[in-house]
Image (cartoon, rainbow, N blue to C red):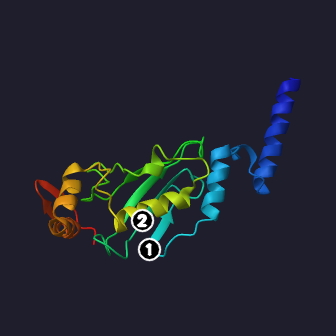
Amino acid sequence: MIGLFKVKEKQREQAQNASRGGGGPSVKKQSAGELRLHKDISELNLPSSCTISFPNGKDDLMNFEVSIKPDDGYYQLSTFAFTFHVSPVYPHEAPKVKCKTKVYHPNIDLEGNVCLNILREDWKPVLNINTVIYGLFHLFTEPNSEDPLNHDAAQVLRDNPKLFETNVRRAMTGGYVGQTFFPRCI
């Protein structure tokens, strides 16, 4: 019977805390990764052509989207959306990044996987989300045919840059490159 009174008393305290904005039982302790990510996001210094959004709300910082609209290069004026999933052990593990926009690009395959060295072997805990976003931005201003995921696009970029430019334009305006259809992103 005494245990029941303690349970009721604890429930009353939690209800009072919740009504005063104290959070009550819904308060979740943040992981070290969440704390670091919160710091990274608060210190973001993005180019004006990049935006960040939280489709699941500000309570889910570990999953967000970044839109990049290059202002130079082959991909100028198109918009590319990326999803970021950040592990609770961040920054000891790089964020998982996928391109939601189907794109003809040597460093992004048709499934949206991204080939960026700082997301793989060159990741270090001193790097942050800002660095990753700038790295993605750089992929659009300077595609790298030497470390490709889309080998066909990389070969065209190396062998025939004018054809590569034509293929990129065709893909961005909503068309076929070879047998692959690309939705409009310009």
Q: Is residue 28 visible?
A: yes
Q: Which residue lies furthest to the top in this view?
A: 1
Mark 2 falls on what kind of element?
helix
Res. 49 mark: 1
Res. 105 mark: none
Mark 1 and mark 2 lie on one chain; the one further toward the N terminus is 1
Mark 1 falls on what kind of element?
loop
Classify 10 Å Cα crowding around label 2: few (below 14), some (14-19), many (20 and above): many
Residue sitting at 67 percent across and 51 percent down? 35
Label 2 sits on residue? 137
Gap between marks 1 and 2 measured at Cα:
9 Å
Instruction: In the rendered view, tell whether residue 164 sits above or below residue 31.
Output: below
The amino acid at mark 1 is: Ser
Q: Give the foreground label among 1 and 2.
A: 2
Instruction: Give residue 132's position: percent from left, percent from top.
Output: 49, 57
Instruction: Give residue 136's position: percent from left, percent from top.
Output: 42, 60
The amino acid at mark 2 is: Phe
Looking at the rendering, in which quadrant would you find the C terminus? bottom left
Front residue of 186 and 25: 186
Instruction: Give residue 55's position: percent from left, percent from top.
Output: 48, 58
Instruction: In the rendered view, tell whether residue 95 sits above or below residue 41.
Output: above
Residue sitting at 55 percent across and 50 percent down? 62
Instruction: In the rendered view, tell whether residue 115 sits above or below residue 65.
Output: above
Q: Do the residues labelled 1 and 2 touch (CB within 8 Å)?
A: yes
Instruction: In the rendered view, tell whether residue 161 sits above or below residue 55.
Output: below
Q: Residue furthest left?
A: 179
